[in-house]
Image (spheres, rainbow, N blue to C red):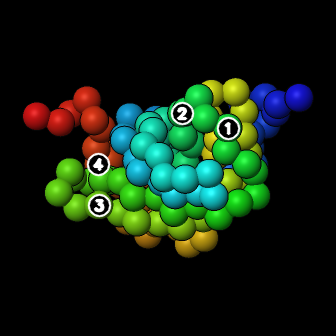
Amino acid sequence: MVFMSQKRMSDRRSQLRRASFIIATYRVKEGEFRDIIKNISAGGLSIRTKRTIATGQPITLTFPLFNFEQMVKVSGKVVRTEPGGFAVEFDTPIKAITKESSLQEIIHELDRK
């Protein structure tokens, strides 16, 4: 399987992605799982996992974004799989992070006290 270079993939993205370390719960046809969001933008995210998740299927995700007390629930489609994870495109962008300045406020599991 041939993968696009990181440069070519970033050229295709319409929104800035931010590295993250957020635990998400997600539901796909294979079941419900918890794994780590490794990067996120207003329009999608990438999950780090050892599971094999089929491309093209719908997905629903729940995770904290700006604080641990408020959870975000989004739906989308698995658009790419690769060794070590998969990428999701949201059905509707997350409006709260459409501006670049908002990306600085995303929480991380490492920040949990």
Please tell me whether residue 79 is drawn above or below residue 96 in the rendered image: above
Mark toward the viewer: 4 or 3: 3
Q: Amino acid type of disc 4?
A: Glu
Q: Alpha-carbon distance for marks 4 and 2?
A: 21 Å
Q: Amino acid type of disc 3?
A: Met
Q: Residue furthest right?
A: 1
Residue 78 occupies which quadrant of the picture?
A: bottom right
- In the rendering, at what x and y percent does residue 100 appear? 44, 53
Query: At x 29% / y 61%, what residue is drawn?
Result: 71
- In the rendered structure, which disc, 3 or 2, sits on the residue that comes first in sequence? 2
Left or right: 84 in relation to 2: left
Left or right: 97 in relation to 39: left
Please tell me whether residue 108 is drawn above or below residue 44 in the rendered image: above
Nearer to the camera, 54 or 22: 54
Kindly identify which numbered label has been placed on residue 71: 3
Q: Are discs 3 and 2 less than 8 Å apart at CB?
A: no
Kindly identify which numbered label has been placed on residue 52: 1
Kindly identify which numbered label has been placed on residue 48: 2
Mark toward the viewer: 3 or 1: 1
Q: Alpha-carbon distance for marks 4 and 3?
A: 15 Å
Nearer to the camera, 88 or 10: 88
Mark toward the viewer: 2 or 1: 1
- In the rendering, at what x and y percent does residue 8 appear? 79, 37
Q: Are discs 3 and 1 less than 8 Å apart at CB?
A: no
Kindly identify which numbered label has been placed on residue 105: 4
Q: Alpha-carbon distance for marks 3 and 2?
A: 19 Å
Q: Are discs 4 and 3 less than 8 Å apart at CB?
A: no
